[in-house]
Amino acid sequence: AQSVTQLGSHVSVSEGALVLLRCNYSSSVPPYLFWYVQYPNQGLQLLLKYTSAATLVKGINGFEAEFKKSETSFHLTKPSAHMSDAAEYFCAVSDQSFNKFYFGSGTKLNVKP
Amino acid sequence: DAMVIQNPRYQVTQFGKPVTLSCSQTLNHNVMYWYQQKSSQAPKLLFHYYDKDFNNEADTPDNFQSRRPNTSFCFLDIRSPGLGDAAMYLCATRGDRGGGTGNEQFFGPGTRLTVL
């Protein structure tokens, strides 16, 4: 069974500050991990993914995430927040079939001017 | 641009009145998914098609059905909507090419369903 836990349903940062969104996973098989962003009333857009290659993954819009097997974590970071980063972020895990994706409950990021 | 299209974007139906949501894609992807997302919750997988093979999640209510007449289109039918079915319904596609490739889902903008 696979699952994802996102700590912190709401995170607030100042513009220009570091963004850190936390994701921990549980998987009985080597996981494949994804971060998606969702703007209001829109679908999900892929930010980045880990599929057993490099453990530090760079995505779009300056985001990156590091896969840490020992900590079962895949936290999302961005060095400097921008107002346009305000959105909801979902972490997801899949098995090797990629036929099922399990999403975390999401973290809403607020960016203060 | 290749994309996933969902129509309508907003759908209002009455309690118990059947409703159909549609999804089309120009990506020629062989896998299509339907998710239900309630307010401030994670998207929940309802079912998916791998080519023509239908895969239902164990906890998807019988009230929810799906049809995929061809590669490009997929429909979600809610036979008797209840108030608890009000949600955003997301369609996603994936182009499986074997060997671990094609592992990314592409999402449509969603249809927000209101049940009166």
Image (cartoon, rainbow, N blue to C red):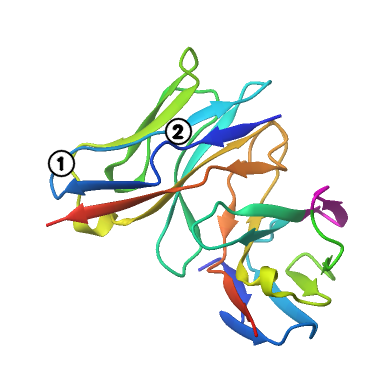
Task: Reply yes or no: does residue A63 show up in magenta.
Answer: no
Q: Which residue is mark 2?
A: A23
| Disc 1: CA contacts within 10 A as few (<14), some (14-19) or many (>=20) | some
Q: Secondary structure at mark 1?
A: loop
Q: Is residue A36 above or below residue B12?
A: above
Callout 1 amino acid: Ala
Q: Is residue A77 above or below residue B12?
A: above
Instruction: Please report the bounds of the magenta region as a residue range.
Output: B48-59
Q: Whole-percent x and y of residue B115?
A: 66, 81
Q: Is residue B101 above or below residue B50?
A: above
Quadrant containing the C terminus of chain A in the rendered view: bottom left
Tell which residue pokes out farthest to the top in this image. A70
Q: Which residue is mark 1?
A: A17
The chain identifier of the residue carrying mark 1 reads A
- Residue at 55%, 51% in the rendered image: B42
Is A68 on the left or on the right of B50, as rendered?
left
Q: Whole-percent x and y of residue B93?
A: 65, 56
Q: Whole-percent x and y of residue A93?
A: 59, 36
**Quick one: A76 or B70, which is closer to the camera?**
A76
- Residue at 27%, 43% in the rendered image: A62
